Amino acid sequence: MTPGVYVYGIVETGSLAGVATAGIGGSPPALLCVDDLTAIVGGVDVAEFEGEALERNVSSPEWLEQKVRAHESVLEDVLARAAVVPMRFGSIFSSPAGLQRMLTEHAAELRVALAGVRGRTEWGVKLHCDGGRVVESLAGAPADPSSGRGYLVQKKTQLDARARAADVAAEVAAHAHESLAALADEAVAAAPRSGEVLNGAYLVRDEERTAFMRRVEDLQRSHAGAFVFEVTGPWPPYNFTNADVGGPAS
Amino acid sequence: MTSDLQRQVTLLDLVDRVIDKGAVVRGQVVLAVADVDLVKLDLNLLLASVEALEEATR
């Protein structure tokens, strides 16, 4: 057992009295303050996160899911009460002194990051597209396939529709992203996974949340049929505080 | 604030953010040796594992 200090995130000192949710090690995290910055920390066994043990652990979906969910649960608890800079999974310091040094050395960047997310949360919007239905809607009513000419016309229409479907889906995705980004402070579109045409993240001010949600619903109404919008959130602002806050060079 | 379009968070949603994003301390290199303060977490290893998981649940 090698004790380590796991860091979930950074908040402004005084914004959070404590965290009751169980963390990675099973017990609720503690707070470590350095002036106006407070780290949410928990004790972990470093041995679990190193070398062969880590290799074994991450190849177990149960281990990974439990740890990732614990990381997120702590931050969601914090997010409900304070502005937070979420750290990436697995940010572990070998001693409280090392963490204190990082907080001191990078206080300026962390303050800027906190100011950028105060009063805002991250929302995820995915757009799924049923390619077959887009083709159908583009091809329109089928021509009479019993005649030779009808068959050829139908074949041609379908090929044209198939060629245009990807463009249509990309246009819908681009329009949706633009329209949602207009209501957000910041927006990023990640590479869509299979079946998706948009995988966006949006940093939304609390007072814009209702308008943002309404915009997604409007988009869904205008693109009913082949397109399905899915919203997740509020998330800690993972996508909008992904700066490298320094630390010892390796 | 709820919407019909809101859905449950999946492990993949989590991993996309928790493992892939968030503030980092000097890249992902987190080494617990001598004067280096952090514990190394092999991100590539984690991501490979998640991709395998994604394939398996499809």
Image (tube, coloured by chain):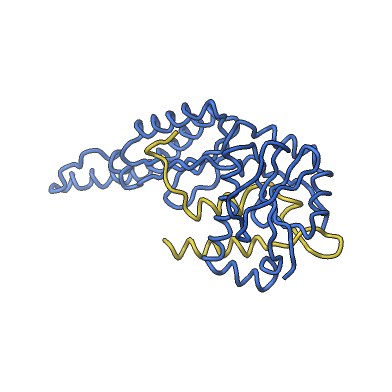
Work out whether residue B46 or residue A160 is closer to the camera in this orientation and state it: B46
Chain identifier, colour blue:
A
The quadrant in which residue A137 appears is top left
Chain identifier, colour yellow:
B
Quadrant where the C terminus of chain B lies?
bottom left
The quadrant in which residue A248 appears is bottom right
Counting every numbered tag in the picture gives 0
Left or right placement of residue A183 versus residue A29 in this view: left
Residue depicted at x 79% and y 63%: B32
Question: A225 above or below B41?
Answer: above
Quadrant where the N terminus of chain B lies?
top left
Left or right placement of residue A104 versus residue B2 in this view: right
Give the percent coordinates (x, y) of residue A40: 69, 48
Left or right placement of residue A52 versus residue A168 in this view: right
Work out whether residue B38 or residue A242 is closer to the camera in this orientation and state it: B38
The quadrant in which residue A127 appears is top left
Residue sticking out furthest to the right: B35
Question: A130 above or below A111?
Answer: below
Left or right placement of residue A179 versus residue A2 in this view: left
Give the percent coordinates (x, y) of residue A97: 83, 54
Residue depicted at x 86% and y 64%: B34
Residue sticking out furthest to the left: A146
Give the percent coordinates (x, y) of residue A48: 66, 68
Give the percent coordinates (x, y) of residue A2: 74, 68
Question: A88 above or below A153?
Answer: below
